[in-house]
Amino acid sequence: AQSVTQLGSHVSVSEGALVLLRCNYSSSVPPYLFWYVQYPNQGLQLLLKYTTGATLVKGINGFEAEFKKSETSFHLTKPSAHMSDAAEYFCAVTDYNQGGKLIFGQGTELSVKP
Amino acid sequence: DTEVTQTPKHLVMGMTNKKSLKCEQHMGHRAMYWYKQKAKKPPELMFVYSYEKLSINESVPSRFSPECPNSSLLNLHLHALQPEDSALYLCASRKEGGRTDTQYFGPGTRLTVL
């Protein structure tokens, strides 16, 4: 069975500092991995995804993530945090055996201090 | 265009009411999903439709009744709900296939059951 673990339910950084949100997955097949962001009272917006090919993927708003098969990780980074990055972030993997549903991590709330 | 629309944005209903949530996409996606999200939690899958047929029901109570009238439209009919059903209801559609496999989410309907 596939699963996703996000380390740290809450991460706080200063504006301009590096953002690092951790995601580890478990999958018996090559995974499709996603990062979504959710602002208060809104739906989920796709930040970036890894399906095949290049292991370093770039997304919107300056975020990027690197797929590391040996570490079963897909950590999300951004070199310089902005106040507008404050939100909930979800890492997810596709479960092909269940109609392609997304298996989500528990989420990480990112706070950005001025 | 990767837009999924949902109406209404907010809904307040009593336990004896009947109401419906609507979801629409015009991206030609043939897989559509209903998720339920409680505060500070990841989305939980409720139903999956594939080619307008219900393919997965995650043991959802019968007071929730999904319907897929055509390939662009997904409804969720609500009847005799309980206060614990109050949540954000998210619809998603999925572009299937290889590197482009992605789920796109709507903005959600915030449901309050009194």
Image (cartoon, coloured by chain):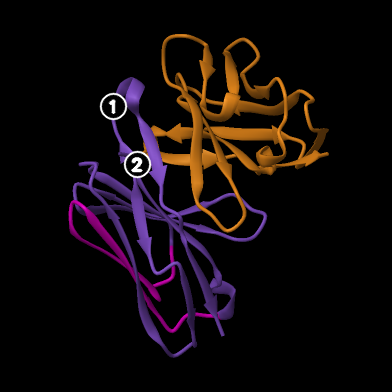
Q: Residues within 10 Å of mark 2 (few under 14, many from 20)?
A: some
**Chain appearing in purple on the rendered image:** B
Q: Residue at x 72, y 24 (%)?
A: A80
Q: Residue at x 42, y 20 (%)?
A: A51
Q: What hue represents chain A?
A: orange
Is residue B26 or residue B33 the one in the foreground? B26
In this view of the protein, can residue A1 be seen by the observer?
no
Image spot of residue A6 (x, y percent): 68, 34
What secondary structure is marked by label 1? Answer: loop
Is residue A15 or residue A69 the one in the foreground? A15
Residues rendered magenta in the picture = B60-82
Q: Is residue A65 left or right of residue B94?
A: right
Q: Is residue A52 above or below residue A3?
A: above
What secondary structure is marked by label 2? Answer: loop
Image spot of residue A49 (x, y percent): 48, 26
Q: Is residue B35 left or right of residue A10?
A: left
As for residue B63 lying within the magenta part, the answer is yes
Q: Residue at x 45, y 21 (%)?
A: A29
Query: Mark 2 highlights which residue?
Result: A99
Q: Is residue B83 above or below residue B37?
A: below
Question: Which chain letter goes with mark 1?
Answer: B
Type of the residue with mark 1: Gly
Task: Tell me which corner region of the image, top left, top right, bottom left or bottom right, holds residue A32.
Answer: top left
Task: Tell me which corner region of the image, top left, top right, bottom left or bottom right, holds residue A97.
Answer: top left
Q: Is residue A112 left or right of residue B34?
A: right
Q: Is residue A15 left or right of residue A30?
A: right
As for residue B87 lying within the magenta part, the answer is no
Q: Which mark is residue A45?
A: none
Type of the residue with mark 2: Gly
In this view of the protein, can residue B57 be seen by the observer?
yes
Query: Mark 1 highlights which residue?
Result: B97
